[in-house]
Image: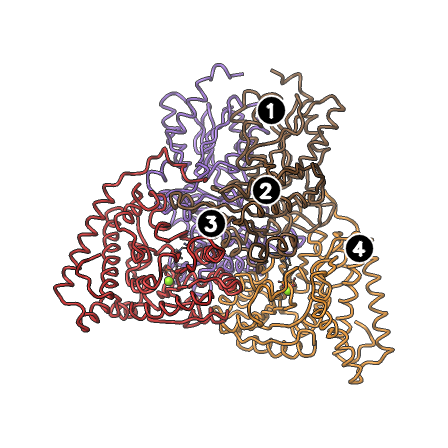
Chain colours: A red, B orange, C brown, D purple
Amino acid sequence: MNSLIGHPRLRGLDTMMLIRAYEERLAILQQQGAPGTCTSVGQEACAVGVIGALESRDRIITNHRSAAHLIARGAEPPRLMAEVLGRVDGYCGGRSGTLHISASELGVVLTSTIVGAGLSLAPGVALAQIMGQGEKGGIVAVFFGDGAACEGILHESLNLARQWELPILFVCENNQWQAYVHRLETMADESIFNWARGHGLEAERVDGNDADAVGEVARQTVAAIRADGRPRFLELLTYRQRGHFEPDDQAYVDKAELNRWLNHDPIALMRDRLMAEGHLDASTLASLESEVGERIDAADAFAQASAWPDPKQLLDFVYA
Amino acid sequence: MNSLIGHPRLRGLDTMMLIRAYEERLAILQQQGAPGTCTSVGQEACAVGVIGALESRDRIITNHRSAAHLIARGAEPPRLMAEVLGRVDGYCGGRSGTLHISASELGVVLTSTIVGAGLSLAPGVALAQIMGQGEKGGIVAVFFGDGAACEGILHESLNLARQWELPILFVCENNQWQAYVHRLETMADESIFNWARGHGLEAERVDGNDADAVGEVARQTVAAIRADGRPRFLELLTYRQRGHFEPDDQAYVDKAELNRWLNHDPIALMRDRLMAEGHLDASTLASLESEVGERIDAADAFAQASAWPDPKQLLDFVYA
Amino acid sequence: MAFLTIEQAINQALYEEMQRDPRVMMMGEGVAKSRAWLLREFGATRVRNTPLAEAVVAGTAVGAAASGLRPVIDLLFAPFLTYAMDALVNSAGKLRYLSGGQHEFPLVTLCMTGSGWCVGAQHNHNLEAMFVHAPGLKVVMPSTPADFKGLLKSAVRDNNPVLFFTDLALLFEQGEVPESADHLVPLGLADLRREGEDVTLVSYGKTVRVCLEAAEQLSECGISAEVIDLRSLKPLDEATVLKSVRKTGRLVIVHEASGLCGMAAELAALAASKAFDALRAPVVRLTGPDAPAASSWVLEQAAVPNAGDVVSSVETLLANRSQSAS
Amino acid sequence: MAFLTIEQAINQALYEEMQRDPRVMMMGEGVAKSRAWLLREFGATRVRNTPLAEAVVAGTAVGAAASGLRPVIDLLFAPFLTYAMDALVNSAGKLRYLSGGQHEFPLVTLCMTGSGWCVGAQHNHNLEAMFVHAPGLKVVMPSTPADFKGLLKSAVRDNNPVLFFTDLALLFEQGEVPESADHLVPLGLADLRREGEDVTLVSYGKTVRVCLEAAEQLSECGISAEVIDLRSLKPLDEATVLKSVRKTGRLVIVHEASGLCGMAAELAALAASKAFDALRAPVVRLTGPDAPAASSWVLEQAAVPNAGDVVSSVETLLANRSQSAS
Ligand SMILES: Cc1ncc(C[n+]2csc(CCOP(=O)(O)OP(=O)(O)O)c2C)c(N)n1
Ligand SMILES: Cc1ncc(C[n+]2csc(CCOP(=O)(O)OP(=O)(O)O)c2C)c(N)n1
Ligand SMILES: [Mg+2]
Ligand SMILES: [Mg+2]
C-alpha cells in the first residue's frame, strides 16, 4: 500500500484507481490479442465499499466481473494478469482465465461464470461456516448482477438463506445491463431489492458509485448479519461503463444514459470529495497515479514473462 | 350432468362429490394392486371454483395432483381411470399413467409431474394465445403447489409473465404439504402470495376450501386478466387430506392440524351451506350420491375392461 | 454378516459414515422424514429437510463441500437432477479444474430411477450416462446390498463429487452385508459375478440379475457365460472388462438406459478399440429404447431387456461359433 | 451460390424461415440485438429479448411449440443449457410420448460451444451427447455454411425439438451456400466429404476439417481416407457410416467432446455390432479428454484432436495392414 495514504478513505480511492488501471491495461492487452474480459470499470465503489466492510474470516463469491472484488480483497495484479493471459503464475495456473478466478487464500472462493451460480453456492459456504468449518463468526458476501437476479436461483437462494438463517450478504450490483440487454427490457420494476423484501429479508438500495455510502451501509449490514446470523440484501445502483466484454463499442447503449453515469464516476466522485475535504491534494494524487501506473506496468511485465502451462499437465486437477 | 341439479352451485357440489368418489375409488384400487396416485381429496373446491370461472378457449396446466382439475373441466372418469391403470382407453393411451395426464381436447395441456414445470410451460402457452394461435382472448390457468412455489422457476415465470404481459392466472394451491415435509419447514413466511406481490402482480389469498369464495375471486380475477391481459396470482389455502401418494398413513402429520381441516371439508361445507340455504335437501343429496356412485362403478368397470397397450407400439409417439 | 435390504444397507452406510465423521451431513426434500433414524441420531443440524429447490440444494452441497463439510444430498428421482444440472455439471464437475485445484468436492448425490413402479418417464429415466460423459464427476450404480453399502461408504469418503444411482426395483432386495464399519468397496472396481468361457455379459444395476438369470439358462444349453457387474460406471474398471473379453471373445452389454451414447456404447467402443484382436463376434448391446419410459406396466416392462433377450442374443452370437472361431 | 460465413448462413436460414412461416419466432437473451436485422424485419413480437432465465425461456418455447408457434431459442453457450435441462429433457423430450401423442414440439434450441476462445469450461463444453442420449430430441451439429443453412431450415420445419450446436470456431468460416430459399439439408443424412479406400474418418463440427486435413496428408503417404461429416447426430445416418466401414474396414472417429459415452463411443459400438465382420483393425476414438476445458490457450488447444493425431493413428492402424487383411 502506498506510503502517501494517510486517511483511510484515501486507501479506498487508491484501490479504485488500481482496479481501474488494471482493467484499462487488460483492455489494451485485449486489443493486442489477449483474451477479452468483463471489466468492472464504473463499479469499483461497490467492491471497495462492501469488501472494506468485511473481515478476513468472511468469504466472498464473485462472478465473471470479478477484478474489482479480487483487487479490493488484496489480490495481486501480477497474478491476476497472468491468469487472464492463461499463464502458470495466475491464481488458477491459467486454467480459469478471466472468467472464473478463485483465490481461496484470500477467501474469494468458487467463482463461477454461470450467471446466478454464485447464488446457488453461497448457502453452502455459509452453512459450513455455521456448522463449524473455518473461523468462527464469518459471513459470506455474494456478488451478482441485475441479470443474475432474474435467474430462478435467486428465489431459491433467498428462501433457503432465510429459512436456514444463513449469514449471507447478498450484493446485487445493478449496473443496468445484462450483456447486451438493458435491464428495463427484462424486469418490469424499478427495483430489485423488492424481490428480497418479498422474501422477508431486510434489503436496502444505495448509490453504488459512492464508496462512502456503500461502505456505510455495508458496515451496518455486516454488523447486523454478524449479530443475528440472518441474511440481508443490498442493491447497489451503478453502471457498466465499458460495455459487456472487451472489446465492446457500446453502439447499442443510450449515450445520454451513459453520459449521466460517466459524470457520476465513482473514482472522480471520491477524488473530488477527498480534495474538497482537504484529505487529498494534487501532488499526492499525482504520486498515487504514478505508483498505480508502475504497479500495473510491473504486473504486465510479470504476466507476459510468465510461462505457459505444460500441456503434459492438461489432466491435473480434474479429480482430487 | 345430473338432472336433479337445479341450482348452479349444486353442479359444483356434484362435481366435487364426483372427484372425491373417483379418487377414493382409486385409493381402493391401489390397495388391490393398481398404481398409486396423488389424490386431491380436500382440495376439490380449488379446482371447481377456479375452473368454473374459465371458458373453453382458456387453457389449463395441472400437475401430479390433477384429478380434480381434469374432472372439473369435464374429463370423463372412465378414461381417467383407464389411464391410471395404464390402459389403451386412457386419455394418453396408458403412456402417462396417473402422473402426467393431458387432455388437449378439454384444453388441459402439457401436464408435467416435475414440480414447477407447469410454471415454465405456462408463459409459452399464453404467448401463443396472444400471438394469434387458438381462439382469441383465451387465458392460461396454471395450477401448482406450495412446494412448486419454492422452485426457482416461479420467479422466472412471474417475471416473464409480468414483463411480457402474458394472460396467466397463477393458482397456488397451498395445501400445507410438500410430499412429506410441512411447508413451514421450507418457507419462513406465512404467505406465498407476497412473492407474487414482490413481482408487482396483483395477488389474493382466499379460503381454498370454500368453492363459493374461490369461484368469486376467480371470476373477478379472470375478468381482470381478460380485460388488460396482465397476469395475476391466487393463493388458495387448503389441505391435503389423504397424504401425498397412495397409500400414505400420514403418521408424520399433526393430527390436530389435520382434524381442523377435516372439519372444514370443502364438500361438507358446500353441502351444509346449500342445505341451509334451501337449495338442497336430503333426498336430492342421496340421489346425487348414488348417481356419483354409479358413475364411478361404471368408470371402474370400463377401465378394468380396457385393453393393455400393445408392446409393439412401444415406440409410437416418441417423435412426431 | 447381516442380512439386509438395499434400503437398509444404504441407511447403514449413511449412519456409519455420519458416526465416523462429523463433517458428513445430509440434505434433501424429506430426508429428515425418510431417514428419521438419522435425524434422531445426528440431529437437525446434520440431517436437513430442504425446500423443493433442487438447484440450490445441489449448489449448497457444492459450496459446503468446498468449505469443509461432506454433504450427501438426496434428490429423489433421477429426472429431478435436471434442475440441479448447473450445480453438478458446471460447478461440482468443473470448479476444481478451473480453479487450478483450489477446491475439493466431497459430495454425494443420491437418486433413484428404474422401471417397475409405473411412474413414467419423469420419474423413471436412467440418465447416469449423462454424468459419465461430464468431466470431474464419478458415477456409481450398484446392484447388491453389500455393494450398496460398501460403495456408498467409499463415495462419502471420496473427495470428488459422486453420483449414486439406486434402481428402485432393487430397494427391497435382500442380501448378505459385512457388518464391519470398514466394509468398503472401492470406486472403480467391477465385480466378476460369474465366471464363464464363451461370452462376457456386462451390466450394472437391476439388469445384472437379468444377466445372471440368462447365464443360468445358458449353462443349461452348455453355454458358459461370464457376468460382470460394473458397480462403478466412472471410474470404469476397463481392465476387468477387457480381461474377460479377451478370454471369451464375445461381449454382450445389457442395461436399462437408452442405448445412444449410453454405457453400452462406451463398453462396446472399449472392446472394439482395446480388445479388437480378441473379439470373435459382433458386440451386442441390449438396452432400453430411445424412448421415454411409459407408465403402463406392459410398455414399461417391454422396454427393459430381460433374460430371454440375453439368452437369444447369445445363442445367435454362438450359432456361428465354429465359423468365426479363429 | 452465395459466399457466406456460417454466421450469415444461420441468419439467412432464420430470415427465410421467419419470412415463410409467420409462426416462427425467436427468443433469447440478446437475440433482438445479436439479430437486430430480424428484429427490424419481423418486429418485437416475433424477435424477443428475454431475461436471463434459461429455464423459463426454454419452458416457454416448449409451451409455445405445443400451442401452435414454432419457436427458435438462442441459449448462447452450451453449458447454459444446464439451466434449461428440465424443459428440454423432461418436457420437450417426453411430453409428446407421455401424452400419447397429443403434443408436437416444433422447437429449435441454438447454442454455441467449442474451443478457440480461451473462455474455459463453463462456456466451452461440447455436451451434445447428453441430448443424443435423451429420448425425443434431435441433435444437429454441422460444419459448413451450406449445411448450417440447410440444416437449420430443416430443423425449423421439423415437428420435433432440435438442439442445434454451433462450434464457435467455425462462425466466421466462409463457403458456398445455395441461394434458393428451398435449400434444405434433411436431418439424419451424413455427408461423404471425401472418398477413400483404406480408412473411414468420421467426425462432425469443427473436427471435420481436422479429418480433411489429415486425409490430405495421408494421401501424400499413399493412404486413402474416406471422410464422413455426420452433420446430424440424432437421427444418426447409420447407413452411410456402415457402408463406408464395410468398404474400408477401418474406423477412426474424431470429435472434440469428451470420449466417455460420447458420439465416438456410439459410432464405435455401431461398427462393432453392425459391421463387425468387415472391421479389419481396432476402432480408434480420438476425442477430447475427460476433463473440463481450460482457458489457457495451450491447454485448450492440447485438448482438441488435431490432424497430426489423426494421421498418426491411421498410420498405426495401417502399419499392420498386411497382417490383419483378411
Ligand atoms: C446462465 C448464463 N447465461 C448467460 C450467460 C452469458 N452472460 C455472461 S455475463 C452476462 C450478463 C450478466 O448480467 P448481470 O448478471 O447483470 O451481470 P453484469 O454482467 O451486468 O455484471 C451474460 C448474459 C452466462 N454466463 N450464464
Ligand atoms: C422437481 C421435482 N422434485 C421432487 C418431486 C417429487 N414430488 C412430487 S410431488 C411433490 C410435492 C410437491 O409439493 P407441492 O408443490 O406443494 O404440491 P402438492 O403435492 O402439495 O400438491 C414432490 C416432492 C418432483 N416430482 N419433481
Ligand atoms: Mg448487470
Ligand atoms: Mg403442497
Residue drawn at 43 percent across, 72 percent down: A189
| Position of residue B82 measured from the top left corner of the image (x, y, whole percent) | 76, 56
Circles 1 and 4: CB distance less than 8 Å? no
* Quarter assignment of residue A54: bottom left
Subunit under mark 4: B
Residue tagged by mark 3? Answer: C68
Circles 3 and 1: CB distance less than 8 Å? no
Position of C147 with respect to D315 (left or right) is right
Q: Earlier in the sequence, mark 1 or mark 2?
A: 2
Residue tagged by mark 1? Answer: C244
Q: Secondary structure at mark 3?
A: loop
How far apart are the alpha carbons under marks 2 and 3? 19 Å
Classify C168 as above or below D203.
below
Q: How many marks?
A: 4
Subunit under mark 2: C
Q: Amino acid at mark 2?
A: Leu
The mark found on residue C152 in the picture is 2
Residue drawn at 58 percent across, 52 percent down: C80
Q: Secondary structure at mark 4?
A: helix
Q: Amino acid at mark 3?
A: Gly
How far apart are the alpha carbons under marks 1 and 2? 26 Å
Q: Amino acid at mark 1?
A: Ser
Residue tagged by mark 4? Answer: B31
| Position of residue B236 measured from the top left corner of the image (x, y, whole percent) | 63, 72
Subunit under mark 3: C
How far apart are the alpha carbons under marks 1 and 4? 46 Å
| Position of residue D278 measured from the top left corner of the image (x, y, whole percent) | 55, 23
Circles 4 and 3: CB distance less than 8 Å? no
Q: Are marks 1 and 2 on the same chain?
A: yes
Determine if residue D178 is in view. no
